[in-house]
């Protein structure tokens, strides 16, 4: 039922799916992971093609979508943005209408979220957001699936996100409120997540029972956390600010002292890529609390669930 309802839809934001659909996608990802580990993978997407447009670098998103399509029996087509006519001024709308005549879905990673919304408006096929400056919904699907695998129930857990109020922080506001998790977003003053997304999260939280807090105080945010999550201090497109941000964010590093403030069995997440010894120490990244590489692996399984449903 839920699977059928997702067919043909876009996934530009975690909020494009209902709470029930989001839970289904995580559970289906866990199921597809089991199937793959036991050596069986049904060719659910035989004959289907996914076009993938990249305006920014990628390791995990590109490889996990590409391998995911192959494992599902479909065909992944990487479309480098600078090789498309899009780079020479063909409109997003025309590109969307043309691609809809050839392929069965589009995954796009770009800067402007509005461009992805425009692509989805003109495409007749599902459009998946593979990261914009605003959101990274596929990442959060895999992240919460990983926490569910490690901790069981998500509802009632507390996550502390420490760092920049970026696309990951914004999508975590959407995701945690959806599953009833508490979320404390800890940032330096002036680096808070998107105000509109925060307002929406507060509304959804009042329905699902999540407690959402924004703070600049790392101790207050991390106290009692079941999960600590961090991300780079300068995202793609902000390279020129990196040196300045290293100074601004220096007290927001996830290290062994910060872990001591959280619950003894705290798990640590990072969407990767990481700048080791900046936002996170190697001691934590490679230590016993880190579930970071399970998280990276789960991009594959969670997105296979997404592709199998949408396409
Ligand atoms: N986490 C993530 O999206 O990684 P990539 O930038 O390597 O795709
Ligand atoms: N916030 C980071 C996430 C990378 C997966 C960026 O946008 O570069």
Image: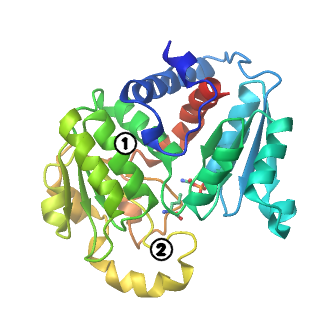
- Sort mark 1 into few (<14), some (14-19) or many (20+) by Cα contacts within 10 Å: many
Q: Secondary structure at mark 1?
A: helix
> For residue 149, which quarter of the picture?
top left
Considering depth in this image, is 98 or 145 the residue closer to the camera?
Answer: 98
Quadrant of the image for the C terminus? top right
Residue shown at 37%/61% (left/top)?
A: 283
Q: Is residue 249 above or below residue 102?
A: below
Taking the image in four quarters, ligand 1 sits in the one at: bottom right
Q: Secondary structure at mark 2?
A: loop
Residue shown at 55%/25% (left/top)?
A: 6
Among numbered discs 1 and 2, the one appearing first in the sequence: 1
Q: Position of residue 101 (x, y in %)?
A: 85, 36
Considering depth in this image, is 188 or 252 the residue closer to the camera?
Answer: 188
- Sort mark 2 into few (<14), some (14-19) or many (20+) by Cα contacts within 10 Å: many
Residue that label 1 marks: 175
Residue shown at 74%/53% (left/top)?
A: 93
Q: Position of residue 46 (x, y in %)?
A: 79, 21
Residue that label 2 marks: 234
- Viewer-nearest of discs 1 and 2: 1
Q: Position of residue 40 (x, y in %)?
A: 67, 15
Is residue 260 something one can see in this rendering? no
Is residue 140 something one can see in this rendering? yes
On the picture, is 177 further left or further right than 108? Answer: left
């Amino acid at each position: 039922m839920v699977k059928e309802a997702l067919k043909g839809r876009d996934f530009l934001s975690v909020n494009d799916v209902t709470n029930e659909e989001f839970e289904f996608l995580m559970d289906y990802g866990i199921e597809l992971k089991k199937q793959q580990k036991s050596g069986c993978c049904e060719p659910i997407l035989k004959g289907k093609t996914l076009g993938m447009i990249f305006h920014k670098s990628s390791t995990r998103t590109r490889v996990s979508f590409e391998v995911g399509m192959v494992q599902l029996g479909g065909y992944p087509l990487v479309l480098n943005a600078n090789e498309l006519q899009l780079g020479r001024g063909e409109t997003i709308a025309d590109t969307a209408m043309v691609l809809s005549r050839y392929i069965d879905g589009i995954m796009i990673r770009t800067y402007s979220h509005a461009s992805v919304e425009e692509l989805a408006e003109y495409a007749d096929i599902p459009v998946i957001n593979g990261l914009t400056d605003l959101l990274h919904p596929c990442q959060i699907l895999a992240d919460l699936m990983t926490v569910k695998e490690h901790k069981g129930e998500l509802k009632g857990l507390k996550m502390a996100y420490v760092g920049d109020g970026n696309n990951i922080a914004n999508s975590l506001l959407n995701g945690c409120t959806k599953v009833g998790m508490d979320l404390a977003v800890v940032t330096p003053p002036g680096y808070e997540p998107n105000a509109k997304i925060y307002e929406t999260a507060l509304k959804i939280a009042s329905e699902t029972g999540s407690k959402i807090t924004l703070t600049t105080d790392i101790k207050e945010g991390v106290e009692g956390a079941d999960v600590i999550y961090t991300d780079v201090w300068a995202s793609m497109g902000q390279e020129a600010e990196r040196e300045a941000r290293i100074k601004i964010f220096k007290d927001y590093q996830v290290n062994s002292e910060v872990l001591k403030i959280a619950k003894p069995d705290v798990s640590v997440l990072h969407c990767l890529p990481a700048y080791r010894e900046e936002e996170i120490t190697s001691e934590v990244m490679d230590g016993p609390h880190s579930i970071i590489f399970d998280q990276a692996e789960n991009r594959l399984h969670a997105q296979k669930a997404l592709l199998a449903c949408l396409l």
